[in-house]
Amino acid sequence: MSRERESGEGSQARRFRLCLAALLFPLLAACGFHLTGTRPLPEALTSVYIDMDTPYSVVKPPLESALRTALLRRGAVVTQSAGAARTVLKLSELTEGRLVVSVDPAGKAVEYQLTSSVRYALAQDARDLVPSDRLRISRDYSFNAQQVLAKEAEEARLQAYMQEELATLLLLRLESLLNRPPAAAPAAAPAAAPGARPGP
């Protein structure tokens, strides 16, 4: 009997949570709240060409692939040529680095900091909508000299993951910059009344 009561109470609690979510979601949407990946893109990103400068790579870096996927998921058109797009997203100077953070008593590195950065700019008709800037992220990870091969593979996976995270952050930054209201123009000085004398 107690199990039936507990089951009934559990189903009531689930129904209550579902009803609460159904009531809250329209209110949040009316306030401008959108779940990640569902809010509309700025107009400048609805049709875009990704111009990725990778002179020493024969395959697309994870950053470009992740950015393309994120844009397509949000309903954007990612074109195959700059002429067919509304804007051109220029990505260059993609760099990855590794710094020693700490060493063991024998002087061997036991912790590294991985970094990944890219320079970006968004242009429309040779005019910069978003001027050139750099975005950088970093992550720490431990290193075991007894597991060199495993750690090298782990580092490669972490670097790829960081580039995917970099793509997410880059899209968020572009949205923020494009949605920023334009700066108000300075107020003009009031015109002098006809016949008024200039001040001393």
Image (cartoon, rainbow, N blue to C red):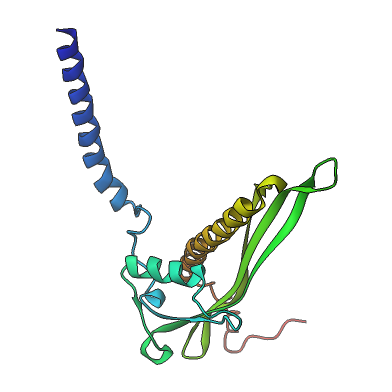
Which residue sits at x=56%, y=82%?
53
Which residue sits at x=22%, y=29%?
14
Question: Is residue 177 at all visible to an observer of this figure?
Answer: no
Residue situated in front as seen by the camera: 95 or 125: 95
Residue situated in front as seen by the camera: 176 or 71: 71
Q: Quadrant of the C terminus?
A: bottom right
Residue 16 occupies quadrant: top left
> Horizontally, is 19 left or right of 91 in the view?
left
Specify the farthest residue to the right.
Answer: 106
- Residue 41, image x, y percentages: 37, 68
Residue 57 occupies quadrant: bottom right
Residue situated in front as seen by the camera: 173 or 177: 173
136 over 25 or under it: above or below: below
Q: How many marks?
A: 0
> Horizontally, is 153 left or right of 48 in the view?
right
192 over 4 or under it: above or below: below
- Residue 197, image x, y percentages: 68, 86
Which residue sits at x=78%, y=46%?
102
- Residue 155, image x, y percentages: 61, 56
Q: Quadrant of the N terminus?
A: top left
- Residue 136, image x, y percentages: 63, 63
Question: Is residue 189 at all visible to an observer of this figure?
Answer: yes
55 over 25 or under it: above or below: below
